[in-house]
Amino acid sequence: MQELYIKVPGTTDTSYKITIGSGLLPSVWPAVEAGFPKARLFLITDANIVAAGHLDTLLQGRDVPSYVIRPAGEPSKNIGTVVAIVEAMEKAYLGRDTAVLALGGGTVGDIGGFAAAIFKRGVPVVQIPTTTLAQADSAIGGKTGVDSSVSKNAFGAFWHPTAVFIDVAALRTLDKRQYRAGLVESVKHGLIASEEYFEFLERNLDAILARDPGVLETLASYNCAIKGRVVEEDPLEKNQRRILNYGHTIGHAVEAASDYTLLHGEAIAIGIIAAGLIEAELGLAEPGRLERVRTVLEKLGVPVKLPPNLAEDRLMDVMKHDKKAVDRWPRFVLLDRLGQVHQKDGQYAVPVSREIVEKVLEKLEG
Ligand SMILES: NC(=O)c1ccc[n+]([C@@H]2O[C@H](COP(=O)([O-])OP(=O)(O)OC[C@H]3O[C@@H](n4cnc5c(N)ncnc54)[C@H](O)[C@@H]3O)[C@@H](O)[C@H]2O)c1
Ligand SMILES: [Zn+2]
């Protein structure tokens, strides 16, 4: 078991604990009860987590007020679900002395965190992530929210967890495609912050794909340390936090232009290769770096080229609507070298011409 502390931004001495282990779920409830001796606990999860047996493993026969999100996944990540959760909490006579536990992937964590943020002006949330994406990314950092009919995460709040429990054994039941796609954020963490971590990933890919618990614990602690440190430095995404968007400018556009038939991590894999190609155009490439990245992503079985049916003009159009666009053109996070993000005039997100992006997209065609 490993433990990390992350300082809550804007405060001097508040931090939250991340506990990482394999087979941790049965000990989570007593740990939360000990941490919140006076609180009443409310659990939020989704139908697939229940079916996979993780709710039973967590509760060990306890009868607790809870809300099960149905159907699981993005279609339920909307304000209607949040309303239903808040009303379920009221009907259970819960008050400001409540603590919420969110057991599931990024959708449960985002919905549960947001419900906790707004219930009676905010009650603590404990994140218990169960996907590779949530354990590496969404459970830490304090971003919570749900989608509107117009855009993703239109309703949201920064609401940091009070504690995070990462049980890598819960990943065993995750389907292969989700499992692999979620690992792309781990590759991203290595690229932006730690050559040592990237090399760890290269060396241990087979064990990672075999879901080896010991290797997955180490992977989780690298992810939490890297993302935690970035968020501590720049909680509100003024500059440095943008490095977490590596591969995401083109990646998000690919995800949207595929009408979300590509999973987030799959689209980001393409975006990471695109960033590598832009680096080559700008003279930022080190010999062999892009090939190493491509090899890791190919071994993960995620796409490294654009799907054949993706219209390039649609992609360019989506990029013009990027939420961080300046003059209707986004900025890009690029690498100087493995583990080190490029900066220009102190900024981590830098301009790249349309011509270069078009050229790179052509190279990315499958
Ligand atoms: N808050 C943030 O900082 C942040 C960061 C990245 C992504 N996100 C959000 O995260 C969401 C995606 O998260 P995700 O990829 O975890 O998707 P998800 O929560 O939809 O989970 C994927 C699928 O796997 C199922 N599942 C989850 N854990 C399982 C397990 N252990 N065994 C079997 N099935 C399991 C879920 O029910 C779902 O069907 C998106 O909404 C995205 O916007 C948030
Ligand atoms: Zn991402």
Image: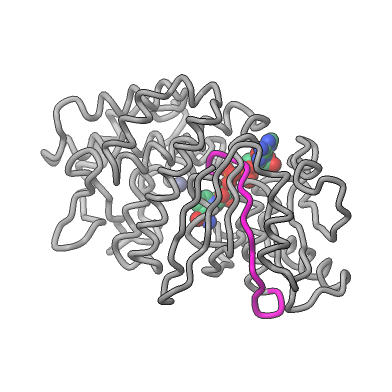
Q: Which residues are magenta?
A: 119-133
Residue 128 picture location, percent across and down:
63, 51
Q: How many marks?
A: 0
Q: Quadrant of the C terminus?
A: top left
Above or below residue 206? Residue 13 is below
In this orientation, which residue lies closer to the viewer: 50 or 38?
A: 38
Q: Quadrant of the N terminus?
A: top right
Q: Residue at 74% across / 40% down in the picture?
A: 54
In the rendered structure, the answer to whether residue 324 lies left or right of residue 220 reads left
Residue 143 picture location, percent across and down:
51, 62
In the rendered structure, the answer to whether residue 322 lies left or right of residue 85 reads left
**Can residue 164 be seen here?**
yes
Q: Residue at 81% across / 69% down in the picture?
A: 89
Residue 301 picture location, percent across and down:
47, 23
Residue 194 picture location, percent across and down:
29, 42
**Can residue 314 be seen here?**
no
In this orientation, which residue lies closer to the viewer: 293 or 227?
A: 227
- Say which quarter of the image contains residue 310: top left
